[in-house]
Image (cartoon, helix red, strand yellow):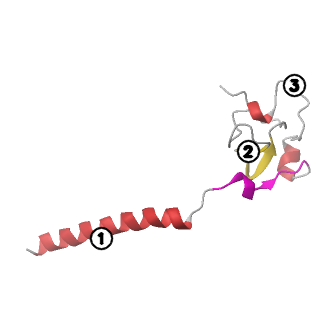
Amino acid sequence: MKSQSSRRNFLKLSLASVIGVTVGNKVLIKPANAADMVKLTEDDPQAAALKYVHESPHSDKKCFNCALLQGNDGDEWRPCAIFPGKTVSANGWCSAWAKKP
């Protein structure tokens, strides 16, 4: 009898944990929003190392057509996988530019 009671308690606690984690994530962890992020500056050390500029010198290579750019199409400033926590100009460019597939 004890094994059934233990198993039942284990299942109850497991279910409560899954529900708690799921609800907690929706309440406590807020997804990153581009409006809350800092705009990348050209003199940022990482930006300078990758030769980032707000206006691309290449007519066919801009952040908006780079595979690394994230966020919503059409937004002027969007998150980039290369510069976590910061947004880049959609018309910008850096040496990590990679053509969208």
Q: Residue at x 68, y 54 (%)?
A: 33
> Which residue in the protein does label 1 denote?
13
Q: Name the mark nearer the viewer: 1 or 2.
A: 1
- Segment colored magenta: 32-42
Identify the element where label 1 is drawn.
helix
Between 59 and 52, the residue placed more toward the observer is 59
Between 94 and 23, the residue placed more toward the observer is 23
Choose the circle earlier in sequence order: 3 or 2.
Answer: 3
Numbered circles on residues, count: 3
Between 47 and 85, the residue placed more toward the observer is 85
Left or right: residue 80 versus residue 16 is right
> Which residue in the protein does label 2 denote?
82
Compute the Cα span from label 1 to label 2: 41 Å
Q: Residue at x 13, y 70 (%)?
A: 4
Q: Name the mark nearer the viewer: 3 or 2.
A: 3
Return the x and y of residue 42 as percentages of the image width and height: 90, 47
Name the kind of residue labelled 2 in the image: Ile
Which residue occupies the extreme front position in the image?
A: 74
Quadrant including the C terminus: top right
Quadrant including the N terminus: bottom left
In the rendered structure, does residue 48 fall within the stretch colored magenta?
no
Q: Residues within 10 Å of mark 1 (few under 14, many from 20)?
A: few
Identify the element where label 3 is drawn.
loop
Would you say the residues marked 1 and 2 are in contact, meaning their CB atoms lie under 8 Å apart?
Answer: no
Return the x and y of residue 100 as percentages of the image width and height: 69, 28
Name the kind of residue labelled 1 in the image: Leu
Choose the circle earlier in sequence order: 1 or 3.
Answer: 1
Query: Is residue 84 placed above or below 93 in the rendered structure?
Result: below
Q: Residues within 10 Å of mark 3 (few under 14, many from 20)?
A: few
